Image (tube, rainbow, N blue to C red):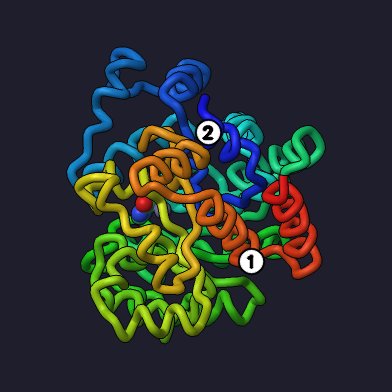
Amino acid sequence: MTDLDNFIAGLPKAELHLHIEGSLEPELMFALAERNGVAIPFASVEDVRAAYDFSNLQDFLDIYYAGANVLLTRADFHDLAMAYFQRAAADGVVHAELMFDPQTHTDRGVPFEEVIEGLLSAMAVAEAEYGITSALILSFLRHLSEEAAFATLAMAGPWLDRIAAVGLDSSEVGHPPSKFARVFAAARQKGLKITAHAGEEGPPEYVYEALDLLHVERIDHGNRALENPALIERLASEGMTLTVCPLSNLKLCVVSDLTDHPVDKMLALGLKATINSDDPAYFGGYVADNYRAVAKARGLSRNDLVQLARNSFTGSFLPPEAILANIEKLDAYAAG
Ligand code: HPA
Ligand code: ZN
């Protein structure tokens, strides 16, 4: 490990864009398939990894939803999240905001309660064992109807005080934020914070819709906002956080090479970019791997890395006093 690798591993950071189902490593997929007697269309762990060759978002989503079939019980969701927290702890993560896709599970007959209670129990252990605080973001699948999203929000009713925010993920093109304006308004009325994937594959107009119709507090990805100077200006002036995912962008061909990744351009434009892993088991790295890969490819300085970590705290859904405490930790680390 180089000095920079070590600096990144120790850098206190929050992870804001992580699909917990996307942290399902092939080894755990096999173990859960066996435990639950679920058949999977792969002969070996190597076979699974070989299938992770995507040319776009949909290629990935097809395999990601298939992988999630092995998750059935609250113990499965607990084990899944614990495996993530273990990697996060090693990567200097002190706070994580986990997206989960209830519809991927409830549509297979897995009760909402099993999903969320398994995640919540792991979150409690992560705080006790690793000192990692965490929050949940309930994400609606945008390829499904708004009516289905409303049904999911209703299912979450008994746990609303344990859910920080709602999000929007899955197949972006053809499923604009406007399709979900009413359910996001209902979620806001319930006091939930709002985020949405926008501008990963979808056009800048989808980012405008996320801002104006969903009233997002963060944009997940946001890469294609860079095509529109007025939008860049607006995102910068509003201090809107972008949860950028370099290795995801590479694997899903949002960028053709990491040397073309725009994260430092975003910082130079005054955009509040953060670094995240998205679906680390599928995209070849956890959050520190993402910092390292893009730092090397773009020649980021320590100051850039500290700025990205600072943005991860100020862009989090933590209360102000917790943000301040984390920033103090970061500043102490950066001062060496
Ligand atoms: N984009 C959209 N939906 C997703 C992603 C993503 O990167 N990961 C998991 N669901
Ligand atoms: Zn994502």
Q: In the image shown, does 230 or 270 lie closer to the viewer? A: 270
Amino acid type at image mark 2 = Asp
Q: Tag 1's secondary structure?
A: helix
Residue drawn at x 75%, y 35% as measured from the top left: 130
When asked about the image quadrant of residue 118, the answer is top right
Neighbours of disc 1 within 10 Å: few (<14), some (14-19), many (20+)? many
Q: Say which label, 1 or 2, has the lower sequence index.
A: 2
Q: Is 40 located above or below residue 247 in the figure?
A: above
Q: Is 2 located above or below residue 205 in the figure?
A: above
Q: In the image shown, does 203 or 101 lie closer to the viewer? A: 203
Q: Is residue 205 in sight in this rendering?
A: yes
Q: Tag 2's secondary structure?
A: helix
Disc 1 marks which residue?
Answer: 314
Q: Is residue 213 in sight in this rendering?
A: no
Instruction: Estimate the x, y position of residue 71 in percent, counting from the top left.
Output: 49, 33
Residue drawn at x 63%, y 31% as measured from the top left: 90
Q: Is 311 located above or below residue 189 in the figure?
A: above
Neighbours of disc 2 within 10 Å: few (<14), some (14-19), many (20+)? some
Q: In the image shown, does 42 or 196 lie closer to the viewer? A: 196
Q: What is the number of the mark on residue 40?
A: none
Disc 2 marks which residue?
Answer: 5
Instruction: Estimate the x, y position of residue 179 in percent, counting from the top left.
Output: 33, 76
Instruction: Estimate the x, y position of residue 209 in percent, counting from the top left.
Output: 35, 81
Instruction: Estimate the x, y position of residue 72 in percent, counting from the top left.
Output: 52, 34
